[in-house]
C-alpha cells in the first residue's frame, strides 16, 4: 500500500466538513489527509473580513504545506478552491506531486473567479453582495433548490450543506489570479462532473477561460453528477483520488 498525502481545498461557501466522507475513505485506504478550512470559512468563519481575498487563502495553504513540512502532496481543489491550489502550487511547486481539479480548472493569469460566468452573472452576484452581504459577502446559494434534481443528495446532505456554509468574502472572487507559471510543470488530473471531456474539448478553442484545462500534462476522469461530487458521490471520488497516486 502506498501512502499519499492529500490536501483538500473546498470551493465557495464551504469548509473542511464538506470533505468528511471523502477524507474518511482516503484515510481508510491508508492515506494522510488535510482537509482545509480557509480563513473566514468553516470553523474559521470568525476570521472573515472585507479584506479577505484570494491571496489570503493562497497564503494559508502555502503556510499549511510549510508548517507540516509536506512533500509529494496531491493538492486537490474544488471549484474556486482550484484557484487557491494553483496559486499555492505556483508558490511551492517543489512540495506538490500532482494537482487535482474537481469540476474546475486553473484560470488564466489576470482573470478573477467573479468573471468566470460572464458580466451578467458578476453583476447579479454584486447585487446580492450589496443587498444581503453588507457590501462584502456573497450569501450561500439555496442548496435545496440546487439539489432538487440530484437523487444522490438527500435532505440530510442538504441540511449539512446549509449548516456548513458561510458567506463568501467577495474579494476572494474579485482579486485576479497572479501566477508565475511555476505550477505548469506539475502533472494535473481533471475530475469532470457537471460537464464531459467531449464538452470541454468543444468549449476550449472558443473560450480562453478553459485554455489551461487542455494545455499541459493532463489526465481526465469523468464522474457524472452535480458540481459537488464530495456530497453526491464521495466514495467514488475517494476512489478516483486514490487512483491518481498509483
Image (cartoon, grey):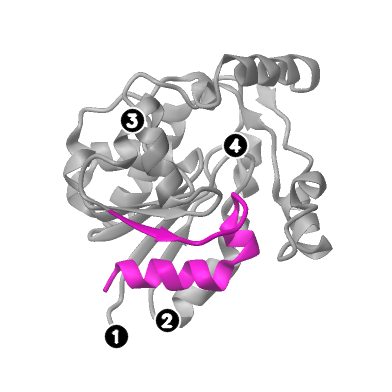
Residue at the spot of label 1: 1
Question: Mark 2 and mark 1 in contact (Cβ < 8 Å)?
Answer: yes
Tell which tag, 1 or 3, sits nearer the viewer: 3
Q: Earlier in the sequence, mark 2 or mark 4?
A: 2
Q: Position of residue 2 (x, y in %)?
A: 27, 79
Callout 2 crowding tier (Cα within 10 Å): few <14, some 14–19, many ≥20: some
Which disc number belongs to residue 40?
4
Question: Mark 4 and mark 2 in contact (Cβ < 8 Å)?
Answer: no
Q: Position of residue 9 (x, y in %)?
A: 47, 49
Callout 4 crowding tier (Cα within 10 Å): few <14, some 14–19, many ≥20: many
> Circle 4 sits in a helix, a strand or a loop, which is it?
loop
Q: Earlier in the sequence, mark 4 or mark 1?
A: 1
Residue at the spot of label 3: 205
Q: Earlier in the sequence, mark 1 or mark 3?
A: 1
Q: Position of residue 106 (x, y in %)?
A: 36, 37
Question: Mark 1 and mark 4 in contact (Cβ < 8 Å)?
Answer: no
Tell which tag, 4 or 3, sits nearer the viewer: 3
Callout 1 crowding tier (Cα within 10 Å): few <14, some 14–19, many ≥20: few
The vertical placement of 66 against 122, above or below, is below
Question: Mark 3 and mark 2 in contact (Cβ < 8 Å)?
Answer: no
Residue at the spot of label 2: 29
> Which of 68 and 209 lies nearest the eye of the viewer?
209
Answer whether residue 222 is magenta in the image: yes
Q: Position of residue 147 (x, y in %)?
A: 75, 52
Q: Disc 2 and disc 4: Cα gap in Å?
A: 31 Å
Question: Mark 3 and mark 1 in contact (Cβ < 8 Å)?
Answer: no
Q: Earlier in the sequence, mark 1 or mark 2?
A: 1
Q: Which residues are magenta?
A: 219-246
The vertical placement of 174 against 143, above or below, is above
Amino acid at each position: 500500500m502506498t501512502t499519499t498525502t492529500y490536501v483538500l481545498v473546498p470551493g465557495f461557501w464551504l469548509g473542511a466538513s464538506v470533505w468528511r466522507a471523502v477524507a474518511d475513505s482516503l484515510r481508510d485506504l491508508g492515506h494522510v489527509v488535510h482537509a482545509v478550512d480557509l480563513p473566514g470559512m468553516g470553523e474559521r468563519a470568525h476570521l472573515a473580513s472585507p479584506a479577505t481575498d484570494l491571496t489570503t487563502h493562497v497564503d494559508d495553504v502555502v503556510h499549511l504545506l510549510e508548517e507540516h513540512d509536506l512533500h509529494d502532496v496531491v493538492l486537490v481543489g474544488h471549484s474556486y478552491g482550484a484557484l487557491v491550489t494553483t496559486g499555492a502550487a505556483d508558490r511551492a511547486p517543489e512540495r506538490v506531486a500532482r494537482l487535482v481539479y474537481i469540476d474546475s480548472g486553473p484560470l488564466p493569469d489576470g482573470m478573477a473567479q467573479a468573471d468566470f460566468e460572464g458580466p451578467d452573472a458578476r453583476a447579479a452576484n454584486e447585487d446580492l453582495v450589496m443587498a444581503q452581504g453588507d457590501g462584502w459577502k456573497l450569501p450561500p446559494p439555496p442548496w435545496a433548490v440546487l439539489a432538487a434534481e440530484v437523487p444522490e443528495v438527500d435532505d440530510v446532505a442538504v441540511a449539512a450543506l446549509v449548516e456548513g456554509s458561510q458567506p463568501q468574502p467577495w474579494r476572494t472572487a474579485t482579486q485576479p489570479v497572479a501566477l508565475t507559471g511555476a505550477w505548469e510543470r506539475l502533472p494535473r488530473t481533471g475530475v469532470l462532473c457537471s460537464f464531459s471531456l467531449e464538452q470541454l474539448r468543444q468549449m476550449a478553442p472558443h473560450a480562453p477561460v478553459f485554455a489551461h484545462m487542455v494545455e499541459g500534462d493532463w489526465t481526465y476522469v469523468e464522474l457524472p453528477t452535480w458540481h459537488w461530487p464530495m456530497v453526491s458521490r464521495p466514495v467514488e471520488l475517494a476512489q478516483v483520488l486514490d487512483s491518481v497516486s498509483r
